Image (spheres, helix red, strand yellow):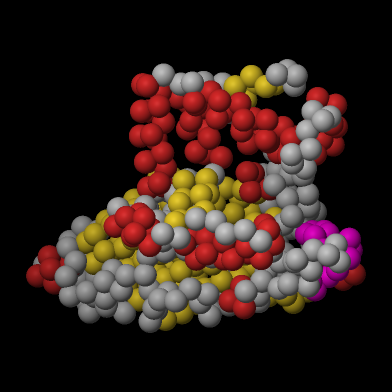
């Protein structure tokens, strides 16, 4: 470890306040909500650690591989008596990389494979089998794969960054560069989650977002965002039970924070050395709901602040986001820890005001984080005195969503008491 090029390194300054682990390097470089920024950090780290330069970075989620499998069909892995499908891909990768039984199988079935670490032998073999099957695919399947990959660029399940500025500009022009939107001509919302639990718990966490957006007579808007994390541990997480999520909410510059709740404050409340937490109702607003007697976060991964990591931690109080300094230029940000014990539900609420951005139509762009499928319910309401209908979206956020409200009609169609304002 003493010879590691990452020994003693900390994350870049803009992420240092929350990134918890020491010896930061290439494997932890995907920290920015803006993919080109993360790619540039990764290229720098790769050169530092491996001493080679690269022409770009390609990142993809398991969903891209699932989409390819939908075209070429299942893959049988010789020796393992295992078949990989769209339904079991992620689960089998976790099994062979993390489960002791799966790790032992790789040593038995691939004893001479020294091209990668022992726990990645199955993954490397599967990648080889996948590529071989794609190379020998008939033309109609290759065309279908190409079409699917073009779609995955739009959803950010495939992300490409090139150091050649001309190639990168082409990606930007086509809207395929996986950039963070920094426009000040419209409203924007980008919720970014980072699982820093040292576990594979994300697959068991549902993210549910409700955003109520209310215009005022001047064109400004008030957001009330409710973010609910539902953690149902339906299988092995291969790590610590409690889900530690660092949540960042990016909004237009000039936005004014109003209030928030549900973020971890770091102030111990109960559990661990403080004694057991109540059986139910730990927080007065029911921000955290758990089965009786399970309001206990337990141990967490070794970190810069807690090198041991084995001791149990108390449950902290909750409050507004602890971080209101953005780590991205051209965006305001509200961020903080959200801690969810296993089989519990945590609700975070955040409200902010966005001053008028355009004299024309009001438009809201909601960006999707790669690899996530949050359930989104957003309502855009015109001013209370307007009779104009609002805008509404309710569904799974599989790609960026834009909602536009004709504010010219709002201004010209005012009548007292014709639009009852619901309580928020």
193 with respect to 329 (left or right) = right
Above or below, 198 against 262 in this view is above
Query: Which span is picked out in magenta?
Result: 296-316
The residue at 62%/78% (across/down) is 13
Could you say which quadrant of the image residue 348 lies in?
A: bottom right
Image x and y of residue 283, in percent: 68, 67
Figure quadrant of residue 179: bottom left
Q: Which of 264/331 is in front?
A: 331
- Classify residue 79 as left or right of residue 108: left
- Which one is in front, 263 or 329? 329
Considering the image in quadrants, where does the N terminus appear? bottom right
**Residue drawn at (27%, 78%), measured in percent from left and top?**
356
Q: Is residue 347 left or right of residue 200?
A: left
Location of residue 134 with respect to 282 vertically, above or below: above
Give yes or no for residue 410 being in the magenta stretch: no
Toward the left, the furthest residue is 412
- Residue 7 image point, x, y percent: 79, 68
Determine the residue positioned at 78% across, 52% down: 240
For the question of whether residue 367 can be seen, the reply is: no
Q: Is residue 387 above or below residue 17?
A: above
Q: Quadrant of the C terminus?
A: bottom left
The rendered magenta stretch, by its main secondary structure, is classed as loop
- Residue 325 in sight here: yes
Q: Is residue 238 left or right of residue 368?
A: right
Question: Residue 302 colored magenta?
Answer: yes
Q: Give the x, y percent position of residue 64.
A: 50, 38
- Vertical comparison of 354 with 277: above or below: below
Number of marks in the image? 0
Residue found 68% across the figure and 52% down from its top: 344
């Amino acid at each position: 470890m003493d010879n590691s090029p990452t020994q003693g390194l900390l994350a870049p300054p803009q992420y240092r306040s929350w990134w918890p682990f020491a010896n930061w390097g290439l494997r932890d470089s995907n920290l920015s909500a803006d993919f080109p920024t993360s790619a540039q950090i990764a290229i720098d780290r790769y050169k530092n650690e491996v001493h080679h330069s690269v022409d770009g970075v390609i990142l993809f989620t398991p969903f891209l591989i699932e989409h390819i499998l939908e075209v070429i069909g299942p893959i049988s892995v010789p020796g393992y008596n295992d078949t990989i499908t769209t339904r079991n891909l992620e689960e089998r990768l976790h099994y062979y990389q993390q489960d002791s039984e799966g790790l032992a199988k790789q040593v038995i079935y691939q004893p001479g494979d020294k091209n990668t670490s022992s726990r990645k032998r199955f993954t490397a073999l599967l990648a080889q089998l996948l590529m071989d099957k794609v190379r020998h695919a008939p033309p109609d399947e290759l065309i279908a794969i190409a079409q699917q990959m073009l779609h995955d660029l739009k959803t950010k399940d495939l992300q490409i960054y090139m150091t050649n500025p001309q190639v990168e500009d082409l990606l930007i022009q086509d809207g395929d560069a996986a950039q963070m939107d920094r426009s000040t001509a419209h409203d924007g919302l980008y919720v970014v989650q980072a699982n820093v639990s040292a576990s594979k718990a994300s697959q068991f966490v549902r993210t549910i977002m409700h955003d109520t957006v209310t215009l005022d007579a001047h064109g400004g808007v008030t957001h009330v965002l409710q973010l609910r994390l539902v953690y149902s541990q339906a299988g092995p997480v291969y790590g610590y039970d409690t889900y530690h999520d660092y949540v960042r909410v990016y909004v237009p510059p000039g936005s004014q924070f109003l209030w928030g709740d549900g973020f971890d404050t770091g102030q111990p409340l109960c559990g661990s050395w403080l004694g057991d937490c109540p059986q139910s109702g730990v927080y007065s607003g029911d921000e955290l709901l758990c089965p009786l007697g399970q309001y206990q976060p337990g141990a967490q991964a070794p970190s810069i602040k807690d090198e041991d990591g084995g001791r149990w931690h108390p449950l902290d109080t909750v409050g507004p986001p602890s971080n209101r300094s953005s780590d991205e230029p051209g965006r305001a940000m509200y961020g903080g820890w959200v801690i969810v014990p296993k089989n519990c539900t945590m609700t975070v609420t955040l409200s902010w005001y966005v001053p008028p951005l355009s004299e024309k139509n009001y438009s809201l762009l909601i960006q999707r984080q790669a690899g996530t499928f949050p359930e989104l319910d957003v309502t855009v309401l015109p001013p209370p005195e307007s009779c104009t209908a609002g805008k509404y979206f309710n569904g799974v956020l599989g790609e960026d969503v834009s909602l536009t409200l004709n504010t010219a009609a709002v201004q010209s169609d005012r009548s007292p008491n014709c639009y009852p304002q619901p309580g928020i």
